[in-house]
Image (cartoon, rainbow, N blue to C red):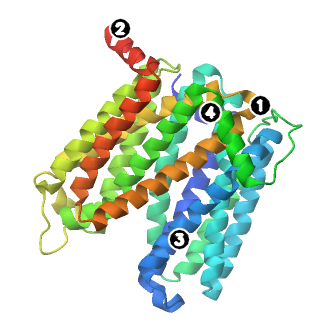
Amino acid sequence: MSAFSLLGSRRFGPFFATQFLGAFNDNLFKNALIVLLTFRAAQWTTLDAGILANLAGGIFILPFFLFSATAGQLADKFDKAMLARAVKLLEMAIMAVAGAGFYLHHLPLLFGALFLLGLHSTLFGPVKYALLPQHLASSELVGGNALVEAGTFVAILIGTLAGGLLAAASFAPAWIALAGFAVAAIGYASSRAIPPAPAPAPALRLNANPFTETWRNIAFARSERSVFLAIIGISWFWLYGALFLAQFPGLAKNILGGDEGAVTLLLATFTVGIGAGSLLCERLSGKRLEIGLVPFGALGLTLFGLDLALAAPASLPTAAPLAVGALLAQPGTWRLLGDLLALGICGGLFIVPLYVVMQVDSEVAHRARIIAANNIFNALFMVGGALGAAALLAAGVSVPGLFAIGAAGNALAALWLFLRAPDYPRRALALLRRR
């Protein structure tokens, strides 16, 4: 059976729908709000639209730093299916708050809703990855994680597109609020079908101090070397991926000379690659954990990142923005798209085995708290990467130059990881000899 057969199972299908709809809704609301603020900021506030857009991104990610430790404790102490339903109810309430903010044109209320959506994602993260080992057999974990990663990126893509379309529609605020609430309600309905996932540590005493609990979670993660190295690898991937994704608008407009559709084309190509690479893991690994795929993914991320840097200047902007059809006829475009597709495929090969390592090597009683530590590291790496990229761009580095620096950084990060975890390259060599 393929991974797709899991979608028809009650052990996985309702959970997959719940997490997919949550990721979709987060990105629908976030992108719709950013687009509205970009083009209609004068109707809402005197603040600069660019400042507001960056503020929105910071507000959304802030709860990951503040509440991940608490989220991990809750997921270890309580039934995860029950927590999933509670988080979906919270999401419905958040979208009601957002609707009020749109109706009243009240920016603080909308930013409050965005913060709460970040909290919603923070609370669901440990549930999302700690639940899989409870409901899936060991032979299903690779396929289950592959579907989750592929589904997450597809949900991000569709949610981002839907948010932009709704923001451009007549009566946009009403449509955004209605769509967000409807998606949250459907997500709650699907969460009710998730089977029980009993707590591994029901006697756990909750620590209300997020700072001391964060250090404790990190200590849990560091206690198992394979888990901590997997977390560093996962966090690096999110930094690397976010670095490339953030440059798509500038790449599409200033280098390719494309219109808004070009940004969608780049994002869709990368998303398809991530999905294909994630699902390819199950086939290449024989439905078991195969860490030997990680070095191949890392190598591809470096090589195709470098080639993207070389391919990017091949197509130069014209006087008028090019539609997607005209852009595809330009020399160099297909090479660039091929690089993005290959980057996504290699990203899937890299990240899926690392998620499975984190799940299976974590102590069961601490698993959700270790996943919470992973989420904190992910957020730290992405924020650090964004600040570094902004500094390089401000210093005059071009977008292709930024891609080249990122690819070189990936080579160094992979070298660091594999020197500390030599089993990864050893398994990769064994795979080559076997094939």
Image quarter hosting the C terminus = top left
Mark 3 or 2, nearer chain start: 3
CA neighbours of label 4 inside 10 A, class few (<14), some (14 to 19), many (20+): some
Q: Which residue carries the number 3 mark? A: 56
Residue depicted at 56% across the width and 73% down the height: 176
Residue depicted at 18% across the width and 53% down the height: 312
> In the rendered structure, are the residues bearing label 2 and label 4 in contact, judged by CB atoms less than 8 Å apart?
no
CA neighbours of label 1 inside 10 A, class few (<14), some (14 to 19), many (20+): some
CA neighbours of label 3 inside 10 A, class few (<14), some (14 to 19), many (20+): many
Q: Which residue carries the number 2 mark? A: 434
At label 1, the amino acid type is Ala
Query: CA gap, disc 2 to disc 4?
Result: 33 Å
Asked whether residue 191 is in view, the answer is no
> In the rendered structure, are the residues bearing label 4 and label 3 in contact, judged by CB atoms less than 8 Å apart?
no
- Mark 2 or mark 1: which is in front? 1
Mark 4 or 3, nearer chain start: 3
Q: Which of 348 and 387 is in front in this view?
A: 387
The image shows residue 337 at horizontal and vertical percentages of: 24, 48
Query: In the rendered view, does 35 fall on the left or right side of 18?
Result: left
Query: In the rendered view, does 286 fall on the left or right side of 96?
Result: left
Secondary structure, mark 2, is helix
Secondary structure, mark 4, is helix
The image shows residue 423 at horizontal and vertical percentages of: 46, 17
The image shows residue 47 at horizontal and vertical percentages of: 48, 87
Answer above or below: position of 30 versus 294.
below
Q: Which residue carries the number 1 mark? A: 365
Mark 2 or 4, nearer chain start: 4
Query: CA gap, disc 3 to disc 2?
Result: 50 Å
Mark 2 or 1, nearer chain start: 1
Q: Which residue carries the number 4 mark? A: 222
> In the rendered structure, are the residues bearing label 1 and label 3 in contact, judged by CB atoms less than 8 Å apart?
no
Answer above or below: position of 219 versus 188.
above
